[in-house]
Image (cartoon, coloured by chain):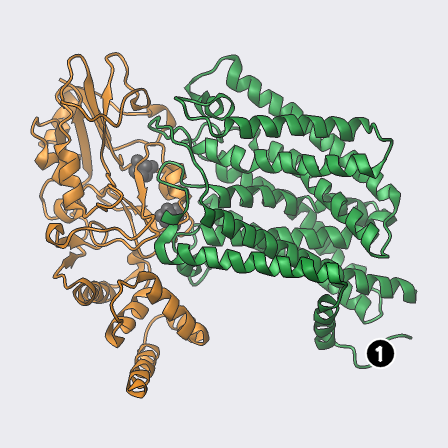
Amino acid sequence: MNAVPHKNLKSFLTDAVRWNLRGGIAFQIFRIFLLFGMGFGIYAYSFQARFGLSVTGMNDIVSWGLYISNFTFLVGVAAAAVMLILPAYMFHDPGFHRVVIIGEGVAVGALVMCLSFIAVDLGGPLQAWHLIPGIGLFNFPSSILAWDVLVLNGYLLLNGLVPAYILYSHYMGRKADERKYRPFVFLSIFWAFSIHMVTAFLYQGLPARPFWNNPLMGPRFLASAFAAGPALIALILAIIHSTTDYKIDRKVFRKLRLIITISAIVNLIMLFSEIFKEFYFPTHHSSSAVYLFFGMDGHNSLVPWIWTSVIINLLATLVIAFNPGKDNPKVLLPACGFLFIAVWMEKGIGLIVPGLIPSPLGEVVDYLPTWVELGVTLGILCLGITVVTWLIRTALIIEQRYEGAD
Amino acid sequence: MSSPKKNEKQTVIQDVLEKPSSRRSFLKGASIAMAAGSAALATGCMATGDTTTSEEMKLRWQEYFKKHYRLMTAEEKKETVKRLERLAKIQNDLDVQIGTDPPIENVLYGYAFNISRCEGFMECVAACVKENNLDRKTNTQYIRIFEMEPGKLDPSTGDGQFYHKVPVENKFYMGVQCFHCENAPCIKACPTKATWREPDGIVVVDYNWCIGCRYCQAACPYFGRRFNWSQGEVPKEELTTKQHYLGNRRRPKGKMEKCTFCIQRTRKGRLPACVEACPTGSRVFGNLLDPESEIRFVLEHKKVFRMKENIGTEPKFWYFID
Ligand code: SF4
Ligand code: SF4
């Protein structure tokens, strides 16, 4: 057939690199911007390497900040790939089958960002090998953070290897053997829920922090992730649809809208339930929520932040649910973008920082990230976007050729 | 000029590699490719500004790959202590003595604080800062004193930053520090077992094993932990040179630290610095297993309570009223 004899693993990799270096002028500019962002991130990080985390806005009271916030949010984005995997592999939905690889690419990029955010947040990144089971000393099963290290790396492996195997088979011009990868797909579905639940338990398990020590934490994480993640994927699909000739069926967008709507509404219901609990009869366990929504002792840096997030969230959910433009992408896509931003604001900074304020001894301080934190964060985001574009570009070229050969 | 120096470095790396050692030798082998780069990074991160000698390089390299304190043999403990003392000499021209005194048999430490006596003088805080070589630059303190309104018993309602003459009429004072919980959330949280409770009840941190994730800090309900956001600074003439590996020795930047009940003193049978310094006698420290001890007297004869009893962390720190 069309299996060219000199195709092998090596040519697979070199072809992937080759395809990714080509591209139009706009694409090249985009890439240079990403490179610049990563370079700036490294420059910013060099200060942290030299002077320690004192160059960040964190302190003994707000001991986690922008890094862990982004980590927490991106775990959700990674987990949301399951919303494509589930229909594609379980229900054999052909439309989703064509895009599932894109979802997996997004998951890999998100995980790379998650792990990077953890790495830059460590005070002793050079000691990170203490975490490797066997060489280091692993506090398993007692520490939830140890669990998180395991599930995140496992999910990265699953989401990297299954698509790699399918792509490689297609690259070689043969059909991927479903019997071989099916068990791993099922495992990855189960795993996607676990990465998110474990990350939620990271916070939920701390009796010292009443704001987090809340049984709704895990489910609410899932709901917001299954709203924000597919919203992002819809945006990426729209970009692919309009800039490449890999066309995506309208039905896929319609189904994604359904998923987003349901998750976003469930998320809002749970948000309401949380707010009710905190404010109907406020105890001193509500003080973090009071700080977050109304400010405390003159400290109110998060108040505009959280209200902006809640309002955008509400409006975007309404637009996606009621669909005023009748499936007009000019209405739905911006709504997806806004929903994504709203959840990022709320599940990131809006969740992590107030959990630490007031301190267990009642002290209230405001947290503001420094330029170093912003720079490193920008660098990691650029890294993640680079990973996603590389993976998706490779995948699309292979898939298109494979489909064309059929 | 440069070639002898290069040779020196070569022999250092060989030296380190050829030395017979534990299971960690595998890691040394695996990482030798990155050695040049990461060694520069590792040492660069800790550099004090002066040129790094090859001896210093070698010591740091061995320090980097050492084991968790609890897994070290007596011999290895001795070696790391020797290295640390030598490094202090090379880097800062300091003569420090680092002990590794083990827990004393049949001792379980407990602490009690007399809230009706304390007048907020903060002598304990000053003594603790001095004894434990706490960072002067960021003004790190293990002990916090809260000025409290009558009728309130939760420090979150008090004032932890008063700068006025004490005592103030109709206020009382409450000291807070790490409570060395029997059921400590910080220990449960740590992903690398870098923090644990010793048999005598002291909760300690292996400063070299900690990776600085700060999960324990988020988990502590009493604000008992402090992080080294940058390298701590102590004026040379104020440094306490009698140190313990798990206590007041120099902490690297990016690591967690906390009150250790002055492990360097108490394991030698002395009192913690705060107890000794308190002018009003509000602080009581001793062996909970000894029925004759003062702490046992307090627990048996005074009205005692513990903070946030509802979380069930079982602090080994009691408050009492005369
Ligand atoms: S007071 Fe905090 S730091 Fe001290 S043992 Fe308890 S939980 Fe750990
Ligand atoms: S900061 Fe250090 S001691 Fe605390 S949990 Fe992390 S590794 Fe353990």
Quadrant into which the C terminus of chain A falls: bottom right
Which amino acid is tagged 1? Val
Q: Position of residue A320 (x, y in %)?
A: 77, 31
Q: Residue at x 45, y 27 (%)?
A: A210
Q: Position of residue A249 (x, y in %)?
A: 88, 47
- Quadrant housing residue B226: top left
Q: Which hue is chain A drawn in?
A: green
- Count the numbered circles shown: 1
- On the question of residue A149 being in view, the answer is no
Q: Is residue A21 left or right of residue B183?
A: right
- Per the image, label 1 sits on a secondary structure element best described as loop
Q: Nearer the viewer, residue B184 or B15?
A: B15
When the figure is inspected, residue B90 is found, relative to residue A237, above or below; the finding is below
Quadrant into which the N terminus of chain A falls: bottom right
- On the question of residue B4 being in view, the answer is yes
Label 1 within 8 A of ligand 2 by Cβ:
no
Q: Is residue A220 left or right of residue A354?
A: right
Q: Nearer the viewer, residue A356 or A181?
A: A356
Q: Position of residue A232 (x, y in %)?
A: 71, 43
Chain of the residue that carries numbered disc 1 in the rendered image:
A
Q: Crowding at label 1, few (<14), some or many (≥20) Cα neighbours within 10 Å?
A: few
Residue matched to label 1: A4
When the figure is inspected, residue A175 is found, relative to residue B102, above or below; the finding is below
Q: Position of residue B290 (x, y in %)?
A: 13, 35
When the figure is inspected, residue A386 is found, relative to residue B155, above or below; the finding is below
Q: Nearer the viewer, residue A227 or A188?
A: A227
Q: Is residue B41 left or right of residue A114?
A: left
Which chain is depicted orange? B
Q: Nearer the viewer, residue B61 or B308?
A: B61
